[in-house]
Amino acid sequence: MDRAPSLATLTEQTKAAFEKRFGRPASIVVAAPGRVNLIGEHTDYNDGFVLPMAIDRYTVLAADESRGETARLYSSLVEEQQDVPLSAGDVSFLPAWTRYVRGVFDAYRDEEGIQTPVFDAVVNSSVPLGSGLSSSAALEVATATLVETLTGKSVSPVRKGLLCQLAEHRGAGVPCGIMDQFSSVLCTAGHLMLLDCRSQETKMVPMNDPGIQVLIINTNVKHELTGGEYAERRGQCESAAKILGVPSLREASTSLLEERKSSLDDVHFRRARHVIGEIERTIAAASAIETSNWDEVGRLMYASHESLRDDYEVSCPELDVLVQAAAELDTEQGVIGSRMTGGGFGGCTVSLVRTDAVESIAQAICDRYLEQTGIEATAFATPPAQGAMVITSN
Ligand code: ADP
Ligand code: MG
């Protein structure tokens, strides 16, 4: 299994990198985690429910105020130092990765009147980039935590999540929902977060049974699509809701869908069936976890995967191989359930497994995957971790 440095080790490494680069110790260290969604996929932009948790992989920022003109930011992952201006203005010349950071400065200034002072910083991360575990939200939320620590001004956690979402929209140009940023801000150790994307209300669902682990396996593929798939799915959901006469698919039900089946073409019917069914499954999974009804949780996870594969058509052969391999191991061998997680077309699967079998399960699935695809998968286990935090501030 893939072992990343612990948060404590990552913190020490990042502080040391700061001191080496800038010649003085960092006075502030903050961290924000990536996330994985246990169930509730492609429901966020349909006003539905999602059930994510923070993962034990963090983006850490070590920083100190400076007297320069612009913020100086070094990323250990991309091995690049960039000057990031803090005042309003054109940012099109900035490299892509710094726009997530700059987007946060802009959101705090434009929406809250909070101006970030000049600083130097090193950013490091154990969240794999671009694998659907939300390194982008981790970077934004870590930055927001830094801004609040530097200025001594803070907003509510929900507002913080929304400002980071705005940073992703305006800074990076990605029209994401609220799940990623809310997870990185609000999640707490030992809990999943049932998030109602319509009301933006959250309910923490305890999942702290030491006998159960969350296993994340990365296909290490990302299929290059024409780029329009996400927008196309969104559009299909909107049209389906309109035809069903509801503001969003959240307000539709399985019975309404069946009643109006003849007014929808096959594609719109299947897209709507996924979303409506997935919202029901997400609520059901939260209750099943609360009562430790693991058979039911597993059944819901596999049903979610099948629906994403057949009705929503966002899986890919590699994700299907991983889920199939997990399903074949079965509950006897410690696998509770498995499904693709994230937007799809590559990225990771999430599985619930028995802790005592996690190593052998990961090995068996990765072996099977290599055999069938010729690709090495990477696996790691994580408990539900803690959301954003200030580690040092002096
Ligand atoms: P995901 O959020 O699933 O990891 P995204 O494509 O949304 O994938 O975001 C990944 C991008 O975020 C990277 O390509 C990079 O631009 C930026 N990023 C995230 N973390 C870091 C980091 N520690 N250093 C530099 N860039 C980062
Ligand atoms: Mg992202």
Image (tube, grey):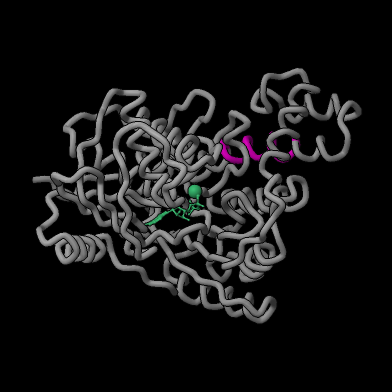
**Which quadrant is home to the N terminus?**
bottom left
In the rendered view, does 341 fall on the left or right side of 57?
right
Judge whether 99 appears above or below 332 on screen.
Answer: above
282 or 48: nearer the viewer: 48
Q: Residue furthest right?
A: 262
In the rendered view, does 249 fall on the left or right side of 380?
right
Q: Residue at the location (28% across, 64% down)?
A: 6
**Which quadrant is home to the C terminus?**
top left
Tell me where residue 95 appears, x and y as whole percent. 43, 52
Tell me where residue 171 appears, x and y as whole percent. 45, 39
Judge whether 369 appears above or below 292 on screen.
Answer: below
Tell me where residue 198 appears, x and y as whole percent. 54, 25
Q: Residue at the location (17% across, 46% down)?
A: 68
104 or 374: nearer the viewer: 104
Judge whether 198 appears above or below 300 on screen.
Answer: above
Q: Quadrant of residue 261?
A: top right
Tell me where residue 305 appears, x and y as whole percent. 67, 53
Q: Which residues are magenta?
A: 272-283
Judge whether 9 appears above or below 134 on screen.
Answer: below
Residue 159 colored magenta? no
Q: Can residue 347 be seen in the rendering of this structure? A: yes
Q: Can residue 290 be seen in the rendering of this structure? A: no
Q: Residue at the location (52% across, 77% down)?
A: 363
167 or 378: nearer the viewer: 167
Ligand 1 is located in which of the four quadrants?
A: bottom left
Q: Residue at the location (75% across, 30% down)?
A: 254
In the rendered view, does 204 fall on the left or right side of 155?
right
Q: Quadrant of residue 279?
A: top right
Examine the residues drawn in magenta and state their main secondary structure.
helix
314 or 230: nearer the viewer: 230
